[in-house]
Image: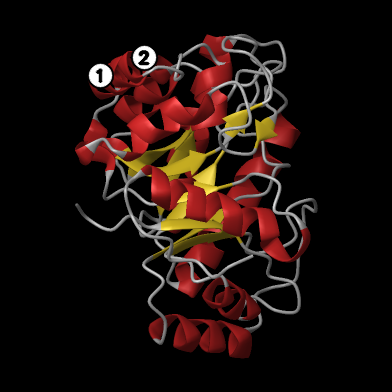
Amino acid sequence: MTRQLFGCHVSIAGGIDKSIARAESLQLGAMQIFSKNASRWHSPPLDLPAVERFKLARSQTTIGYIAVHDSYLINLASPEQESWQRSVDAFCDEMERCAILDIQDLVMHPGAHLGSGETAGLEQIMSAIDQVRDRVGDQVRILLETTAGQGTNLGWRFEHLAKIIDRCHRGNLAVCFDSCHVFAAGYDLRRPEDVKAVIVEFDKQIGLDRLALFHLNDSKKSCGSRVDRHQLIGQGEIGDSGFRTLLREPSLASIPKIIETPSGPDHRDDLLTLNLLRSMCGEEAETCEP
């Protein structure tokens, strides 16, 4: 079986180039970063010497996959024109940062319709993506992340993502499958037969060829709760069996898998979780001991 690419979210504190060394110290095969402070609208431009150090460090590692996650402030589904345009501008900046860093994938939450309704919200997202493509092109792939459907968030049904992908045919769109979000949205992942049924449904609605990344997180809340609360793998409502089935599905083996669970002091819990995931798919632990 193909050796799977496991990783976690890594800090860029002290400079974006520092993230590579942190990932190496954890012996990651994949990593996710922010390209700037995710809780602010505006950030200074990327430091070009740090970008060159980032690229050099990346070329000298065995890290097989890197993604950027966009700012949580961005809402491309907003019905308010000023807020929507501000989000589009911020998303264009995120795309440009990825291009400068030579990072292929940008993960984003589709957005919240804030009461305007699903149809109107999806139209806003699709219009936003069209404007983004007009302004910055399609060098960077947009990964639409599945959501739990909390509040008025869109993307909690596979059909939502399928509609966006079908409508924005100009391209370079794929999906980030978050196990906690999918489970909380009502897709059961607890038993092997449930997992297989969800994979079939995803393939039917979107297509496995559009599945580019997993966020592997257990859920503190029940299936269908539509509440987004991550838990350590095997310690939440999904449990070991569901993750073991996902990890042993041959059609999913080549897709990078990032954890977003509590990391613990010095990434101790990340290391334990990554070792657990490797054991679940029949691999020997590759990460260093916690």
The answer to whether residue 63 shows anywhere in this view is yes
Work out which quarter of the rendered image holds the C terminus and state it.
bottom right
Disc 1 marks which residue?
A: 200
Q: Is residue 135 visible?
A: no
Q: Position of residue 4 (x, y in %)?
A: 33, 55
Q: Nearer the viewer, mark 1 or mark 2?
A: 2
| 3D distance between C-alphas at marks 1 and 2 | 10 Å
The residue sitting at 65% across, 44% down in the picture is 261
- Residue 12, position as x, y percentages in the image: 68, 70
Tag 2: amino acid:
Asp
In the displayed structure image, the side of residue 164 where residue 21 appears, left or right: right
The amino acid pointed to by label 1 is Val
**161 or 57: which is nearer to us?**
57
Q: Position of residue 145 (x, y in %)?
A: 50, 35
Which residue corresponds to the image point at 79% horizontal and 50% vertical from the top-left? 39
Quarter of image, res 79: top right
Q: Is residue 60 above or below residue 207?
A: below
Q: Nearer the viewer, residue 51 or 32?
A: 32
Compare residues 97 and 19 and report the one nearer the observer: 19
Q: Which type of secondary structure does the marked residue at label 1 adopt?
A: helix
Q: Which mark is residue 194?
A: 2
Q: Write the residue at 63% across / 39% down.
A: 232
Whole-percent x, y for residue 115 in the image: 71, 11
